[in-house]
Amino acid sequence: MSWFESFVLGLVQGLTEFLPISSSAHLRLTAAFAGWHDPGAAFTAITQIGTETAVLIYFRKDIARILSAWFRSLTDRTMRGDHDAQLGWLVIVGSIPIGVLGLTLKDQIEGPFRDLRLIATTLIVMGVVLGVADRLAARDETGGRHRVAKERKTLKDLGVKDGLIYGVCQAMALIPGVSRSGATISGGLLMGYTRESAARYSFLLAIPAVLASGAYELKDVGEGHVSWGPTVFATLVAFFVGYAVIAWFMKFITTKSFMPFVIYRILLGIVIFALIWTGALSPHAGESAG
C-alpha cells in the first residue's frame, strides 16, 4: 500500500465511520473503484481505532462520568441504581453480541462478507430500514393532523433488553455495508428512542468493540500488502477527520432527517449492482492480491 492510498483510505474512514453509510463498505469500494488491493478487514479494524479515539475525546466528559460511577458501583451498593453506573453495565452487555459473533465469523468477515454484491445488498436493505425508522421517529416528533406528538425514550429509559437489542444491531455491522451507526441508530429509533439518544448510545457502545477489534487485528499488520507505516498514517488521518465529522453529525441529527443518507445508500447500492451486471466491476475486485 502506498502512502497516497493510505491517506485516501484514512480520509474515507474518517468521513464515513460516524455516518450511517458504512465505513467498511466505503473502504472496500474505494479500493475497488481505484483499482487498488482490498485493504482488508485488519486494516479497517485498525484505522477504526483512530476514529474511536475521536469518540473518546469528544465524549470524554460522559465517558469519565460513566466510568467513575461504574467503578464505584462495584463496591458501593448505593451506586448501583445510578444512571451512569447502569449505563456502564449496559455498554458491557451490549458489547457481548459483537464480541461473540466477531470471533465466530472471523473467516467470513475476512472473505465472503467482502463480496461487492453482498455490500450492495446491505447498503440498499439497511437504507430502507433506516428510512422507515426515520419516518416513524419524525411522525412521533411532529404528530399530524389526526394525532398528537409522542414523547420518545431517552438513555434514562435504557434497560438490559434494549441494551441487548442495540448490541445485536451493532453486531450486524460485521457485514460491510450495514454500518455500525446505521444499524444501532435504526434499532434505537425503532425501539422509540430519540435521534440524539440513539446516536449517543451507538457511539458509546462502539468503544469496547472497536478498540478490542483493532487491538486483536494488530498482529496481522505487515502481512500481505499492508505495512505498519501506511496503516498508522491512515489511522491518524482518520482520527482528525473523524473528530470533525462527529462534531458536525451530533449537531445535524438534532434538527435534520436521515433521509439524505437513506437516498445515498440506495443509489450507491444500485450503482454497484449496475456496474457488476455490465461487467465494469468485478464483485471480487482487488481480493486476489489482498
Image (spheres, grey):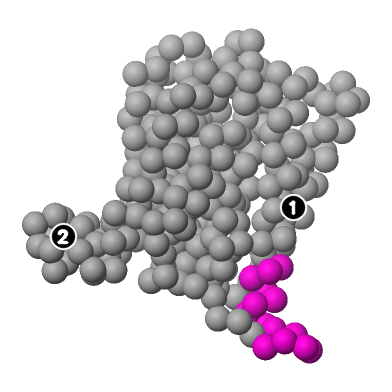
Is 143 inside the magenta-drawn segment?
yes
What type is the residue that disc 1 sits on?
Answer: Val
Relative vertical location of residue 235 with respect to residue 287 in this rendering, above or below? below
Residue 38 visible in this rendered orientation of the protein: yes
**SS at mark 2 in the image:** helix
What type is the residue that disc 2 sits on?
Answer: Ser
**SS at mark 1 in the image:** helix
Q: Quadrant of the C terminus?
A: top right
Relative vertical location of residue 126 with respect to residue 79 in this rendering, above or below? above
Task: Tell me, for residue 73, which label it has, or none.
Answer: 2
Please give the name of the residue rendered at 65% of the width and 77% of the height, measured from the top-left corner. 140
Callout 2 crowding tier (Cα within 10 Å): few <14, some 14–19, many ≥20: many
Q: Label 2, label 1: how many angstroms apart (C-alpha)? A: 41 Å
* Residue stretch rendered in magenta on the structure: 135-148
The foreground one among 104 and 11 is 104
Residue 203 image-quadrant placement? bottom left
Where's residue 230, x and y in %? 44, 26
The answer to whether residue 29 is left or right of residue 117 is left
Relative vertical location of residue 115 with respect to residue 25 in this rendering, above or below? above
- The residue pinned by badge 1 equals 128
Given the current orientation, which residue lies at the most extreme left position?
75
Callout 1 crowding tier (Cα within 10 Å): few <14, some 14–19, many ≥20: some
Residue 64 visible in this rendered orientation of the protein: no
Is 60 inside the magenta-drawn segment?
no
Please give the name of the residue rendered at 53% of the width and 52% of the height, measured from the top-left corner. 184
Residue 34 image-quadrant placement? top right
Task: Tell me, for residue 284, which label it has, or none.
Answer: none
